[in-house]
């Protein structure tokens, strides 16, 4: 008999509480309406008189009409149109028996009002009691619900996936072939365990997905859920940790208890570094809630209880900060590294994202894949979506090459800010600045190719000189980095040459910051300094306490040498950029004039203007 998987309904309690709240609100409205009805249906404010006076005045001919309703009398005086007096008599005797002469006054009897008044009075008396009882009942149920919520505070908040109509499978994910192969083995292990058990293989306890943001870690986990056809519990690492001590550990126990009841199944913990950080870093002490949660995860994954057919999938982009006990074999047996896609994978990803969009025949996705080196799968998805938005904004039925190019540039370097008005002087300065970047990057042999130069503000910049590498690169040499440094400083040096050293502007602030960061990266992380060659001084980013007390793993003398090395690299880059620009002042002027004329110059025009640009020997690296 097939075992039905556990299907929690997290919305049931919420809907129940919402229905009770709605019912309480309706009951309150009814109670208010009953009070208003009761108030408006009270007898009008008639002056009350004794019955003996009624008899005297009626027989004297001073009344026009007497309305009798049981024992209640409403009297209309002779010169009035409506009743102004009221009185009471014995309801068991007639008005004639009480002495009223019917020849002197008209008498009307309301035989139906007596019973109606009784029922109306009875309803008005009982209805508030009933409504108050309903309100009290709802309040008690609400309090009971809050009590149940407090009792379930330590329950897991994991969501169940894998039974949706639109499942994600491995066919829906392009690239990451090695990662998919590792995960396909996990799915096969769940489907055909005897195949592996027959040769003595045991199911992996955990699979850790590692990669930069946007590379598809969560998407691969969803594909595992779609392929496995087994219960798939998904939860974020931050959902374990609460203000109260012990709640996280309780939720871990509850999650694994549910998983074991529904085995074989998969647990997916997204952003596991929220609870899986290295213990003993000095933050929070030994009784830190996060550490207790981590301890419980360690016990559940590889404790005394063995044989549970449960696989834990986890994703993080900070594997360097995870606790070693979490990474050892027996817990996370398998690590799946998911890197940025290469050109072939980028093209396949783009085809998937454009598959359900009306794409014009002239759109070249291969060219887009070549230009988008360094883009993640999320970036490519965003490019496809932006292209569709741009096409819809232009009232086109198809996505054209112009839409795709505009979307790529918007995602890569920011949207154009054509509404920003610059003076002629600012435009000229920006043109010199961007032309300086372009000339230095074009002349130096190990720099990337110029793709576009524009003086139209984009994103947070006043202009952009865009360089794109001709191919994907996994490694970079010292010469390449030095050429990039010189290229970064080309804009500031061009300003300095044309306007003087005291006339440079803040437009190069971002360039200078990036150049300083790259130079320091070369020295302390890549061992590319002159005096400190092959020495690395990287401080672990996950150790928060070290950054708080500014503790370093090297002396003050070494820190001074690092600063000197960074200064030397930046100074050398500025010197090389100055030599290149001074040797090509004519090209600088031509490119500046073209930018002022067209505002945006594409790669072909830039290459034509900078044709035969000089490469001075003094700027070469030996």
Image (cartoon, rainbow, N blue to C red):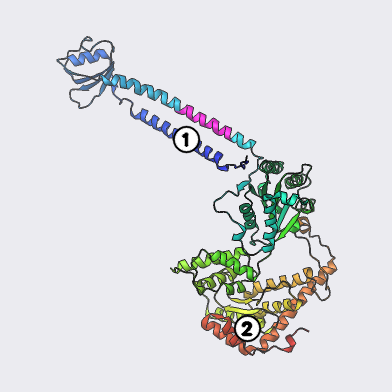
The residue that label 2 is drawn on is 499
Vertical comparison of 121 with 223: above or below: above
- Closest to the observer, 240 or 267: 267
Q: Position of residue 463 (x, y in %)?
A: 58, 75
Picture disc at residue 23: 1
Q: Residue at x 61, y 41 (%)?
A: 4
Q: Residue at x 66, y 85 (%)?
A: 581
Quadrant (top left, top right, bottom left, bottom right) of the C terminus: bottom right
Quadrant (top left, top right, bottom left, bottom right) of the N terminus: top right
- Closest to the observer, 263 or 383: 263
Vertical comparison of 279 with 620: above or below: above
Vertical comparison of 441 with 510: above or below: below
In the image, farthest residue toward the left: 103
What's drawn in magenta, residue-wise? Answer: 131-145
Q: Position of residue 575 (x, y in %)?
A: 72, 82
Q: Mark 2 Cα within 10 Å, few/some/many (few <14, many 20+)?
A: few
Q: Quadrant of residue 440?
A: bottom right
């Amino acid at each position: 008999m097939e075992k039905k998987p556990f299907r929690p309904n997290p919305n049931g309690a919420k809907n129940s509480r919402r229905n009770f709240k709605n019912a309480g609100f309706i009951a309150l409205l009814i109670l208010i309406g009953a009070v208003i009805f009761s108030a408006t249906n009270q007898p009008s404010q008639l002056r009350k008189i004794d019955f003996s006076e009624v008899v005297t005045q009626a027989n004297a001919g001073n009344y026009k009409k007497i309305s009798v309703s049981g024992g209640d009398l409403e009297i209309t005086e002779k010169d009035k149109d409506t009743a102004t007096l009221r009185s009471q008599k014995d309801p068991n005797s007639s008005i004639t028996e009480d002495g009223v002469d019917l020849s002197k006054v008209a008498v009307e009897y309301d035989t139906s009002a007596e019973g109606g008044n009784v029922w109306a009075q009875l309803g008005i008396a009982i209805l508030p009691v009933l409504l108050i009882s309903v309100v009290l009942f709802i309040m008690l149920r609400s309090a009971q619900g809050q009590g149940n919520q407090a009792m379930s505070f330590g329950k897991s908040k994991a969501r169940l996936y894998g039974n949706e109509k639109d499942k994600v499978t491995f066919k829906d994910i392009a690239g990451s072939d090695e990662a998919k192969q590792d995960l396909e083995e996990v799915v096969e292990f769940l489907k055909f365990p005897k195949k592996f058990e027959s040769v003595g293989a045991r199911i992996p306890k955990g699979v850790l997905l590692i990669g930069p943001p946007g590379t598809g870690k969560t998407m691969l986990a969803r594909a595992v859920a779609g392929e496995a056809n087994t219960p798939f519990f998904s939860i974020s690492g931050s959902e374990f940790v609460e203000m109260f001590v012990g709640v996280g550990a309780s939720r871990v126990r509850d999650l694994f208890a549910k998983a074991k009841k529904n085995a074989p199944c998969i647990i997916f913990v997204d952003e596991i570094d929220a609870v899986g950080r290295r213990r003993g870093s000095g933050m929070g002490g030994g009784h830190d809630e996060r550490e207790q949660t981590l301890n419980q995860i360690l016990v559940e994954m590889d404790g005394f209880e063995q044989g549970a057919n449960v696989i834990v999938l986890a994703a993080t982009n900070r594997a360097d900060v995870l606790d070693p006990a979490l990474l050892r074999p027996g817990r996370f047996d398998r690590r799946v590294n998911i890197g940025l896609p290469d050109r072939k994978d980028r093209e396949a990803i783009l085809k998937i994202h454009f598959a359900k969009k009306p794409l014009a025949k002239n759109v070249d996705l291969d060219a887009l894949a070549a230009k988008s080196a360094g883009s993640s799968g999320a970036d490519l998805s965003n490019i496809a979506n932006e292209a569709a938005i741009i096409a819809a904004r232009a009232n086109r039925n198809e996505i054209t090459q112009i839409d795709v190019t505009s979307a790529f540039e918007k995602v890569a370097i920011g949207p154009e800010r054509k509404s920003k008005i610059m003076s002629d002087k600012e435009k000229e300065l920006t043109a010199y600045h961007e032309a300086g970047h372009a000339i230095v990057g074009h002349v130096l042999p190990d720099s990337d190719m110029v793709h576009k130069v524009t003086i139209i503000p984009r994103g947070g910049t006043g202009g952009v000189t865009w360089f794109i590498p001709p191919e994907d690169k996994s490694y970079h040499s010292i010469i390449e980095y030095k050429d990039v440094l010189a290229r970064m400083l080309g804009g500031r040096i061009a300003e300095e040459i044309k306007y003087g050293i005291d006339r440079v502007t803040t437009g190069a602030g971002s360039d200078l910051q990036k150049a300083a960061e790259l130079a320091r990266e070369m020295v302390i992380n890549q061992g590319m300094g002159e005096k400190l060659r092959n020495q690395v001084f990287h401080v672990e980013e996950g150790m928060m306490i070290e950054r708080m007390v500014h503790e370093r793993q090297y002396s003050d003398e070494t820190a001074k040498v690092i600063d000197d090395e960074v200064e030397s690299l930046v100074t050398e880059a500025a010197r090389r950029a100055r030599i290149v620009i001074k040797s090509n002042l004519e090209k600088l002027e031509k490119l500046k004039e073209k930018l002022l004329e067209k505002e945006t110059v594409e790669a072909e025009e830039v290459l034509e203007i900078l044709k035969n640009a000089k490469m001075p020997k003094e700027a070469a690296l030996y």
